[in-house]
Image (cartoon, grey):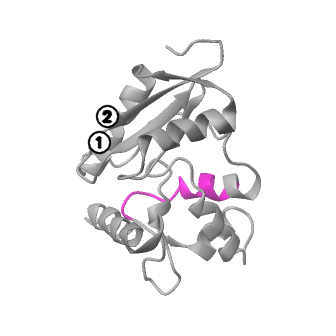
Amino acid sequence: MLSPMGSFAHTAFDTSLGPVALAATDSGVVRCNLPGSDPDALVEEVIARTGLTPDEGGAMVDGAADQVIAFLEGELREFKLDLDWQLIGGFHREVLQATTRIPWGETASYGEVAALAGRPGAARAAGTALSKNPIALIVPCHRIIKSDGTTGGYGGGTAGTALKQRLLDLEKP
């Protein structure tokens, strides 16, 4: 249980695609990084952006970690987690919330997700929002692809694009 004194829980764990870290407040998961990212950087970012004190472990983050592992093993199609959206607002939040409605195994274009978020024609802005997704994997931005059907960027550089393709392949029936 998180303390009412303004703290967040965090954990880091190994997955088949590399180490993942996540953090949660009393409201839900606030941050989840991509496999291979620095877990210490995640904790430092949450501290800097929220002013909360870190506590390692706890039921909420342990349960979220179990779901992330199951997802990456192909055993979970839909996350059942509360999310804390405090690290992202405005149109960016609307894009990410729209992204959560893209079902497992399906994709949408950047333009389609912009339209779902109420701003048709804002594909570039949607791409920017997706690139700032603080709750990666759980908010499935890997399901958003270019309008020509190609993968598009993910997590920076060719390693990120390869990870995006692995996640898309994981969701193929």
What residue lies at 26% left-to-right and 45% top-to-bottom?
15
Q: From the viewer's perspective, is 36 left or right of 111?
A: left
Residue 102 vs residue 73, the one in the foreground: 73
Specify the label residue 100 is tagged with. none
- Element type at marker 2? helix
Residue 146 on the magenta segment: no
Residue type of the residue flagged with mark 1: Ile
Percent of width and height locating residue 141? 50, 60
Q: Residues within 10 Å of mark 2 (few under 14, many from 20)?
A: few
Q: Residues within 10 Å of mark 1 (few under 14, many from 20)?
A: some
Rounded to the nearest whole Å, what is the CA distance between mark 1 and mark 2?
5 Å
What residue lies at 65% left-to-right and 12% top-to-bottom?
5
Residue 83 in view, yes or no: no
Q: From the viewer's perspective, is 122 left or right of 71?
A: right
* C-beta proximity under 8 Å, tags 1 and 2: yes
Q: How many marks?
A: 2
What residue lies at 50% left-to-right and 43% top-to-bottom?
41
- Element type at marker 1? helix
Residue type of the residue flagged with mark 2: Asp
Residue 132 vs residue 71, the one in the foreground: 132
Which residue lies under the disc numbered 2? 66
Q: Quadrant of residue 110?
A: bottom right
Range shown magenta: 94-105
Percent of width and height locating residue 70? 27, 42
Residue 20 in view, yes or no: yes
Specify the label residue 69 is tagged with. 1
